[in-house]
Amino acid sequence: MSFGQTIVLGALAGFTIYLGLPVGRLRLLSSRTRVALAMFAVGILAFILVDVLSHGSGILETALERYKAGKASFGHMAGLVGLLAGGFTLGAAGLGILERRLRPAPLPPPAAGGSQAAVIDADDAARLGEQTDLARRRALQTGLVIATAIGLHNFAEGLAIGVSARAGAVTLATVLIIGFALHNATEGFGIIGPLGAVRPSWRWLMLVGLIGGGPTFIGSMVGYAVTSTPLELCFYALAGGAILYVIGEIWHGIRRDGHRELGLLLHACGFIAGVLTDLIGAHGGG
C-alpha cells in the first residue's frame, strides 16, 4: 500500500466520527433522553479506556519478554513503564487541572430583599441569563475535552494503520481502517452525549470532529514514516488518563438527573457497541 493510499484511507477512518456528531443538533426534550445518550457515551468511552490500556500493557509485556530473553536492557523496560505511568498521570490529573483553570468563575447568587425590588428583579433576570450562558459554555468545554481525549486515542490507532501499511500487511491495514472507521462513527456520540440540552453550532461540531478524528489521519502518516514504540505507548497512556478523567466528569454530572436503571442499561449498550465495532479490526489481526 502506497503512502498516498494510506493517508486517504486513514482520513476516511478518522472522519467517520462526523457521522455521529449531527445528533447533537437534535432537540433533546426530556431528561431521560439526555441521561440515555450520556450513559451510552460513557459506555463507549469505557470500552476505549479498556482498549487503550490493553494496548499499552501489551507493549510493556513485549518489553518484559525481550528483557527476559536478553534482547533488551532493564533500563529500556523501566523507561517504558515510567512513560506509561507518567503519560497516564498527565492525561488524567493534567487535563483535570487545565480544564478547571479554563472554566469561568461562578457568578454570585442573586440578591434578595430591599426597597428597589424592580431593579433587583432586572438584575436577577440578567444574572439568570448569565448563568444559563455559563452552563452552556461549560457543557461545550466538556465536549472539547472529550474530543481531545478521543483524539489522543485515535492518533495511536492511526499509527497502527500506518505501520501495517508500510510493512506490506495490506489486508491487515485495510481491515484496521474499516474497523476504526466503524468504531470512530460511535465516538461522535461520546462527544455530544454529555451536552444534554445544549444545542451546539455546526461550527463547533466541525471543530470537535477535527480534534477527535483528525489525529487518525495524522497518525497514519506518522506511522507510515516513523516506527516508534515509545511514541505509541505515550499516546496510549495520555489517552487512557484523559478518558478516565472524562468518564468521571460525565458520571458526576448526570447523577442528579436520576433514571438510574435506564442509564446503566445504556451504559452497557455503549460498551457493547464499542466491542462489536472493534471486532472487525481484531478479526483482521487474526
Image (spheres, rainbow, N blue to C red):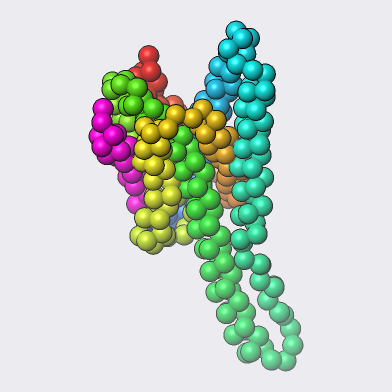
> Residue extending furthest right?
114
Q: Is residue 14 magenta?
A: yes
Magenta stretch, main secondary structure class: helix
| Image height of 16 relative to 109, above or below | above
Residue 139 picture location, percent across and down: 53, 57
Position above or below: 184 against 125: above
Q: Is residue 116 left or right of residue 61?
A: right
**Residue 49 visible in the displayed image:** no
Camera-nearest residue between 46 and 118: 46
Per the rendered image, the range of residues in magenta is 1-23
Percent x, y of residue 75:
67, 23
Residue 61 quadrant: top right
Measuring from the top left, give residue 49's x and y in whole percent: 54, 33
Outermost top residue:
69
Query: Is residue 268 covered in magenta?
Result: no
Q: What quarter of the picture does the N terminus occupy?
A: top left
Q: Position of residue 257 (x, y in %)?
A: 58, 50
- Camera-nearest residue between 284 and 117: 284
Residue 6 drawn above or below residue 197: above
Task: Give the quadrant of the C terminus.
Answer: top left
| Residue 105 position by quadrant | bottom right
Q: Nearer the viewer, residue 174 or 179?
A: 174
Residue 278 shown left or right of residue 12 in the figure: right
Name the residue located 57 percent from the left edge and 67 percent from the top edge: 134
Looking at the image, can residue 164 be seen?
yes
* Residue plotted at (61% across, 9% down): 70
> Which residue is drawn at the image coordinates 61% and 61% (left, top)?
102
Outermost residue toward the bottom? Answer: 115
Q: Name the residue rendered at 48%, 37% in the picture.
A: 153
